[in-house]
Image (spheres, grey):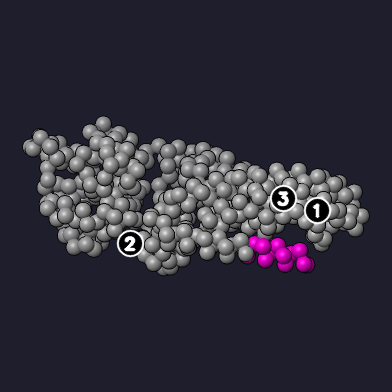
Amino acid sequence: MKTVRQTLLEGAALVLIACAISLGANSVRQRGLDLGRDYFKAPPPTEPLLPLEASSPGSGGNDPDEAPPAEGHENRLVNCGMVELTLEQVRACFRNCDQASGASDPRILFVDARNDECFTEGHIPGAVLLDHYYMDEYIADVLATVECAEQIVVYCNGIECEDGALVCLDLIDEGIAADKLFLFKGGWEAWVQAGLPCEQGEP
Amino acid sequence: MTARAGMLSQVDQTGIPLLVARLAVGGLFIWMGVAKIADPVTFLKLMRQYQVLPTSMPYFLNFVAVAVPWIEALCGVALVLGLAVRGAGLIATGMLVVFTPMILLRGLELYHQGGVSFCGVNFDCGCGAGVIFLCHKLVENVVLFLLALVAALSRSRRFCLENRRPRTGTGFAASPENPPVAD
């Protein structure tokens, strides 16, 4: 009985110490979580997230335009008045911009909703980074750019990723009109698989 | 039965089973805990995928995403060093008991969605090792569970910083024929 009690005490002490360290470390680290923030303010998907790789060969964008839409995402977008763009629409838009100006069109802005590591490895040319989880680091710069744009196309990794929708909601919260916002559902995976141009570099 | 308990006790007293269990479970817990600590956002998102924590309490989800990796890592450090071994073994066992069924249920969910075999299902379980195959992960967790049990129940304290007279009561050498022996 004494051993059981001591074991439980040891376990409880370890948990308490770990919790104290975790809270301390989280508060001092530059990129800790904001414990008071509701990161997922939108309702969760009504259907489970799509499987990766072998679980679903189609996911990740062999042809994302034909992939079944996630119901939760659809509802969220409809509720916010946002429109989803297919790969073809984004490609046409990008091509038109490119031909018209020889460079990225300042009226159309791509917003990358992935993290800085992914962004540095590669992103849509001319895109700006807006990481939903570290909004404070990026929002001031992004807002200055976004306000000049007539259309804002937001993307993240792929169809199973919801960070793009969350960034759209963030921008709406910041006062950006929902009718300027478009979500590229296929995201980076569809873009790369379609062989479209990529750009590398830090945010 | 008594003979078997006696044999287990003798093996346990060598300290080798405990050492193997401590290094295996502790090492893996440190590795996986540090991976999660390094990227709390990814762990937060993966925790949410399991849909076991109430979405109406986002602060609780955030706290779990911050605290669990540290509990895991500290538990691993305690096991590797040989401090509070029973307590750390108990926590490791508890975490495996909680998380393994969650992984299994999530794997079954994906299995029913996609047209692949059960063992062909792969996904990021939030364990800190990235994308894993379901069967591989389940086998790994069962082995870890057994090793964590050894750490929680062993009476030996050989090769431990917490090197003191073994306790009486429960554990592998609970039989009266095998009284505790000091290292």
Q: Is residue B8 magenta?
A: no
Q: Is residue B78 above or below residue B27?
A: below
Residue B45 lies in quadrant: bottom left
Q: Are marks 1 and 3 on the same chain?
A: yes
Q: Looking at the image, which residue is at 28% across and 42% down?
A: A202
Residue with the mark numbered 1: B172
Give the Cα distance between marks 1 and 2. Answer: 52 Å
Residue with the mark numbered 3: B160
Point out the frontmost of discs 1 and 3: 3
Q: Looking at the image, which residue is at 67% across and 55% down?
A: B83
Label tally: 3
Q: Which mark is residue A42?
A: 2
Q: Are marks 1 and 3 in contact (CB under 8 Å)?
A: no
- In the rendered structure, the residue with mark 1 lies on which chain? B
Q: Amino acid type of disc 2?
A: Ala
Q: Read off the magenta span.
A: A1-12
Q: Is residue B10 left or right of residue B89?
A: right
Could you say where residue A100 lies in the image, as x and y percent from the top left?
7, 37
